Amino acid sequence: MCELLAMSANVPTDICFSFAGLMQRGGNTGPHKDGWGITFYEGKGCRSFKDPKPSFESEIANLVSNYPIKSKAVVCHIRQANVGNVCLENTHPFIRELWGSNFTYAHNGQLADYQQTLQTQKLKAVGSTDSEQAFVWILEQLRLHFGDERPDDQELYQYLAQLSLRVNQFGVFNLILSDGNFVFAYCYNNLHWITRRAPFGPAKLIDTDVAIDFKKETTEKDIVTVIATQPLTCDEAWHKMSPGQWGAFVGGEVMAQGQLQAPKVKSHAQLMAEKNH
């Protein structure tokens, strides 16, 4: 499976510390060697870096981990390919325009028998992954449901949760979605988050011998939430999301959250076992 990473903050903040831990899982401490990508928002614009190479070996990943790009919203993904070739067009996160905003999406999991239900009429996937097809389907459903005008935030979050549940019927579906203002997360089986605020303290990464004292890097007004598939630090209390749980974060704070009844779906290992029989 892939791994997700996202950040929501109330002030422009770099994600170098968390990204340094995640990139180790892309071919070093983890098997996610089939590409990686990250998107930083700056106002209404965004800059994205992608590489189909393992993040642990990627010179672009080294650049990102050492260059403190500051942003209020970040979406990141390291890939372990299940559907689609290992190539740039199949590398997350994916970005599309909706309501004059750049929507960025990353998915962890695998879908099966989704093609007929998740068909789209106008938006087409560029690559060949189940993940991107689910993304364009979600965006098309948002347009069909709300029209050309962006809805109220709470309406949008609630409908995103319902759409995520519908996609979840077809397999393992953990989602990160952002438009630069909010960061939306939906959990099926593995998603964790932590909010850091004053009084800040030290933290140490699990995957590499790197530690930081956030008190020296922040102000008392800073609020930063990090969302990840698995906790990245060994000395902090991360919140584990339950199946069907969703949350929307703005400025590092939880703006909305809810709990849906997640379906029981087959894992990638179960699907592969059935296929081999």
Image (spheres, rainbow, N blue to C red):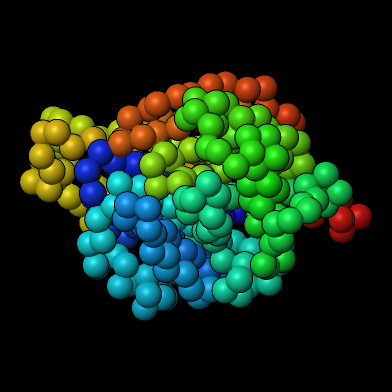
Give left or right: position of 164 versus 233: right
Q: Residue at x 29, y 41 (%)?
A: 9
Q: Is residue 234 visible?
A: no
| Residue 121 visible (yes or no) | yes
Q: Position of residue 47 (x, y in %)?
A: 38, 64
Q: Residue at x 24, y 68 (%)?
A: 66
Above or below, 7 relative to 54: above
Q: Residue furthest front?
A: 148
Q: Percent x, y for residue 91?
A: 56, 66
Number of numbered markers: 0
x and y percent of residue 251 in the render?
30, 36
Which of 193/70 is in front? 70
Residues 199 and 157: in front is 157
Depth order, front residue of 216/139: 139
Q: Residue furthest right?
A: 277
Q: Where is the C terminus found, in terms of image quarters?
A: bottom right
Residue at image x 64%, y 39%? 147
Q: Could you tell me which residue is drawn at 56 percent across and 57 percent down?
A: 96
Q: Position of residue 231 (x, y in %)?
A: 40, 42
Say whether residue 189 is left or right of residue 191. right
Asked if residue 89 is positioned above or below residue 114 in the image, the reply reads below
Q: Relative to 93, does residue 153 appear above or below in the rendering?
A: above
Q: Quadrant of residue 132?
A: bottom right
